Image: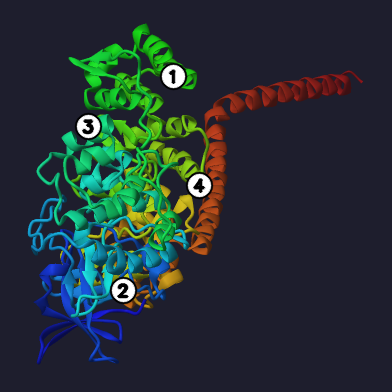
Amino acid sequence: MAQAAAQGGGAEGRVASLGSHFDILVDRPLAELATPYANAYVAVDRELPAANVCALICSPQVPPRLAVLEALHGMRLDGILTPLDWDIIDWPLLGRRCFAIIYDRPVGGPVMVGYSGMGEATLVTPIDRPRGPLGDSELVNEILPPLVTSLQQFLTVGATHRAIRATNVFYRDLGRRQPALGDCCAAPAGLLQPAVYETIEGGLANPWGRGEGTPSDDLYALGVTMAFLSLGRNPVADVPDEQLIADKIARGSYAAIIRNERLSPAIIEPVRGLLSDDAKERWTIQDVDLWLHGRHSSPKQPSLTKRATRPFEFEGEGHLTARSLAHAFARKPSAAAQVVKRPELEAWVQRSLGEPERVKLLASATSEGHDTAGPGNEDRLVARVAIALDPAAPVRYKGFAATIDGFGAALAGAFRGQGSPGLVAETVLGRLPVYWFSAQPGLRPEQVPILKTFERLRLHLEDPRLSEGVERSLYEMNPSQHCLWPLIESRYVVDIADALLAIEGELERRPSEELQIDRHFAGFIAARFKFASNEWFDALSSAEPSVRALGALKLMAKLQSAHGPRSARQTALRLSRQLPPAFQAFHNRARRQQLLERLPAVAETGNLVDLLALVDSPIERQRDAFGFNAAVREYYGIQHALEGLRADGRTRPLRAAHLGASIAAATAMFLAWAAGLTLVVVMS
């Protein structure tokens, strides 16, 4: 999307601009459109000043749903607010950059008032100021048709809404005749949904770990919305979530939610169909559309989960269904660890429940548990047994719970204080998601890539390098997550093309800040820079500061070469402070000194590629190595000659003695010969 910027005040007060079309009026909040993770403001379309538009400023604590934004963009749906534009902007109220989304403003306000604060609030959103029940005619003839038609079109593109609730339905017009579902992109899927709107499976997961889900999850939420709009209130607003989930498991969703309320006969049929706890029996969007067009049938009782002939006693409670027992095990894993090892559990599943396939799953869960050693083994065993008993439920481990497609958002939440990143990693390393897949009767096509993702994640989590681990997994699983490196976190960098420019801006503001790459930045680059090489990051894990600095320079030079900017002066200057020890690798003192003297001038240019060439030029290093090798050879030649001279000095006396003896012998022979010759002459 277009680059966004902030502007100063004017006639409307302070203004933040998004692209070339929209101005956001900072001093004009819209409390009725705000959520716990996004504040709303009046906006102005510069090309259409009379248009009613608004902006949602997303909290930096949550990654937006970029894929859904892109799916919705360009669609004109009467019954769903669709984004007109979005971007990362400078937001003056927080003094940082934030993600912003522009929508048509629903000027008629909410159908039912819900959350209206501007600060942090609980995720549960009761209908705190009901406007009264909607009449059957208004609900069936005016509210539902545009919602269902638009939802039908929306679901065909493969996306899910995951924010359908009574307090997220608005009127587009002042006459309150054009209803539309509100935002579904400013926070992770299902995060803002009260537990009552979630299926049993979704309610069992932590709010951050509910996942993108399926159209069936949206249809369930639509059924709850219909009931609450008809009643004019949430009849279970005061029931704690844990109790509500237990009631849904024990009695079924329809009975647990509607309770003793008298629901209008006009909508009993679709509400029952939509609140079916068996996803295969739950109404589809086509069923709802046919019902709106006059196809009615007698309301039918939802099929109940298979119940055992006798209860299984655990912690003072009797459980008649496998799901109820799995839920109890997950809530009390320490006590469950002792129970799951006993033969009574398998006997109960086989004889009382009469489910042979579940017996096989239970056997595989316990056998794998005994084969796995190490800390946490009992917790993993309980988690596997819970999966075997209730394969459709989320993966649950030590209090962590996430649907199979909710691990990414759950990890993002954990890094923001909503859980433990280490616990998410431990769940993956324990191969619990893989076991979950093995327990399913069959894989849906959209689940195959998820299974492969978990296998890759395990490799990342086992790798101790700076660019791997749980941080790398965060960015692999959340494409819209901005980099959490403290240096640039406030710059909201999602695209690596913006990374170096953000670093420059922050270093400019912090003249004394040293540049030390952390695990977040290394993991972010490794995940987003698809041409990154492992050797780029190996040096970053070195214990030697100069090696780390050289590794950082190589990484930054690659970024600058691929994405700019042309000059990264601040980055170059900070790295140049750490680089002098790297020149010790050069053997030639004169050359080393010459390179050190050139370092400040090259750093001033901000060209990191040139700086890398100065410090780590292969040609210079080859030339230095060649000269060094030649010097070594010359040195050893001199040493050999000197050794020869030293050896000659040590043998000289012995050689002189041998020479003297030889000369004496020769002289004696000569004298003997001369004497003999003289005697011969005299005698003759």
Q: Which residue is mark 4?
A: 449
Query: Quick one: quadrant of the C terminus?
Result: top right
Is 595 above or below relative to 228?
A: below
List x then y, in percent, for residue 558: 44, 64
Q: Which residue is mark 2?
A: 86
Query: Quick one: quadrant of the N terminus?
Result: bottom left
Circle 4/circle 1 CB separation < 8 Å: no
List x then y, in percent, for residue 149: 40, 66
Q: Which residue is mark 1?
A: 368
* Residue toward you, 336 or 643: 336
- Using the rendered image of the protein, determine whether residue 630 is visible from the camera's viewpoint: yes
List x then y, in percent, for residue 382: 32, 22
- Using the rendered image of the protein, determine whether residue 611 is visible from the camera's viewpoint: no
Q: Nearer the viewer, mark 4 or mark 3?
A: 3
Quadrant assignment, res 651: top right
List x then y, in percent, for residue 150: 38, 67
* Residue toward you, 648 or 407: 407
Left or right placement of residue 523 versus residue 179 in this view:
right
In three-dimensional space, the C-alpha distance between marks 1 and 2, rounded to whole angstroms, equals 48 Å
Q: Residues within 10 Å of mark 2 (few under 14, many from 20)?
A: many
In three-dimensional space, the C-alpha distance between marks 4 and 1, rounded to whole angstroms, equals 25 Å
In three-dimensional space, the C-alpha distance between marks 3 and 2, rounded to whole angstroms, equals 40 Å
